[in-house]
Image (spheres, rainbow, N blue to C red):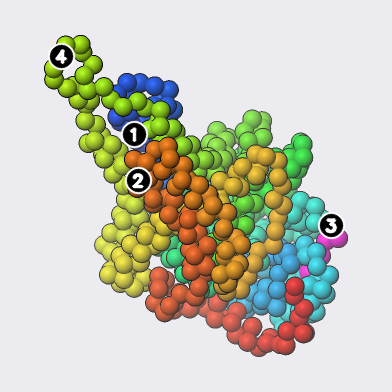
Amino acid sequence: MAGRAESRGERAGGTRALAVAASVLAAAAAGMVFYIYGAADGVDPLDVLRAGLIFLSTWWLAWGAATALLGLTSRQRPAVARAPGAVCGRTVVIVPVYNEDPRVTFARVAAMDDSLRAADPSIPVEFAILSDTRDDRIATAEQRWFARLLARQHGEGRIFYRRRERNTGRKAGNIEEFVAASGAAWDYAVILDADSLMEGATLHEMIRRIEADPRLGLLQTLPKVIRARSIFGRAMQFAAGFHSPVFARGLAAMQGRTGPFWGHNAIVRLRAWAECCGLPELPGPPPFGGHILSHDYVEAALLARGGWTVRLDDDLQGSYEEGPENIVDHAKRDRRWCQGNLQHAKLLDAPGLKPWSRFVFVQGIFAYIAPLIWLAFIAASIAAVYWTPEPDYFPYENWPFPVFPDDQTAKAVGLAVGVFGLLVMPKLLVALDAIATGRARCFGGAGGALRSVLWELLLSSVIAPVLLAFQSRSVLQVLLGRDGGWPPNNRGDGGLSFAEAWAAGRWISLWGLAGMAATHLLAPVLLYWLLPVTLPMLVAPVLIWWTSRTAGAGVFPVPEDAAMPPVLTRHDAVLAAWAAPESEVEVA
């Protein structure tokens, strides 16, 4: 076992070095090409600044492309150890809830419990529903539906419910209090979100894998997004189902024994968690101080610091979650992630962390400042055109013929094509690989999958400036000291009226209009070049409204459309049996 772990770590180290080298070389080449292009009429500070910004932006794009290429080429994975025979350890499934609809959430618990007993009733698995609900009406409904859950599942002594009086530390604090008070009763814990669903067979497989490896502290699955209905939700669901497995395989190959934790749909060894994962309260006031919002990557880093293996097994199926149905809900959730990731700046020098864990923190921070880098590049380009004097075609006295500056058009076009290629090439390669391996059959066939990939690329390109605006505002709010807190997730169809979309996106329209006006006044030659950025911002409310509408049949097909996973079927059956008037379950 030790030899296998050491070999996996060595492979991961080589893979990391290759990915870092490739992405840095690509970024250096882009920065150099732009520098040569910009310096054709003489070097000035703006040329140096823009070349540096291109280097940083291209590194981020190249890093994503390298992850995808690793996923496409990492076909051979080492055999995963699993414990055969009887399972010795006891497992609890932790379901944290925060102002959720208890009927839907508790129906998920019932469905998973049914699935577990159908798969193998001999493996002991229990449930702990940990409520952080602040609304007393919802809390009362939780207690009523918990009683109904117990009666249906005969869950006395197997299914537990607890509501905290104070939600100190949010989800991480909720789990930490539970582990400190009751964790010794179990060996392993499967941590879920309120919208998570997992097949019983998948849960059993995770238990067997963690039981077979005594140094495995956390095993992360790759959840699939389910039940999306809107245009935005269906596009995200398709991208997660079609592209994410390849990116996750590359990530697993790169991170090795210092893998990720995404906060849910993972199993942990409770002894390791209790030893390592007590989170500090960061010094100073929020948003940089206080409780850590993006706690999952910190917990993974602390486990790795303690010598435990943190692993992503991308081959595990039967792991599901729901996603936001519109851009506004996505931006609200992303605001919390932004603040949490920027908090990680205070942890970069934490003692004893693995170098790769520190690098992962840097990646998370960079993911949120990258939009500001692109905006800075656009602003510097406008300034460069404004301040660049007209070329002097007769620089030599008494010389009758004009001297034309070097034509650097080929370099500019080549750089633009290269940057665009880093954006689209990984997804196109994933599509070709899916067609070649037959995986595309589950996504509408070769033609249907390719059509969906192209439509998703087009849609993501159009809404990218809108998401960039939301993300840039989030970063600026954090830097200006505004605490975003932890708002509850919105469930349901996610449809927005145009009035709601206008209220959420009109400020982006103003930004887009201001950007077009500034470009027209200061650098009119760039006006058309910047339309792919400024025009979507100008019509942001329309995009927010339109993408929240229900998608038509067959839009962005996924395997779950044709064959509903058994645990989802069980969940729907429980919900249908639990149908009740709205007055019976009061949910704000």
Give the residue number, with chain letter if any, for mark 4.
399
Give the residues in magenta: 161-165
Residue at mark 3 to residue at mark 2: CA–CA distance: 53 Å
Q: Which residue is drawn at the image coordinates 62% and 57% (left, top)?
A: 332
The image quadrant that residue 329 belongs to is: bottom right
| Residue 343 horizontal/vertical position (percent) | 66, 40
Which badge, 3 or 2, comes first in the chain's sequence? 3
How much space separates mark 1 and mark 2, taking CA atoms? 19 Å
Can you tell which of label 4 and label 1 is closer to the viewer?
4
Whether residue 116 is visible: no
Say whether disc 1 or disc 3 marks the residue closer to the N-terminus: 1
- Residue 509 location in percent, x, y? 52, 55
User: Is disc 1 placed on a helix, strand or loop?
Assistant: helix
SS of the residue at dot 4? loop
Along the horizontal axis of the image, is 52 left or right of 587? left
* Above or below, comparing residue 24 to residue 304 in the picture: above
Q: Which mark is residue 166?
A: 3
Residue 136 point in image, percent of width and height:
84, 70
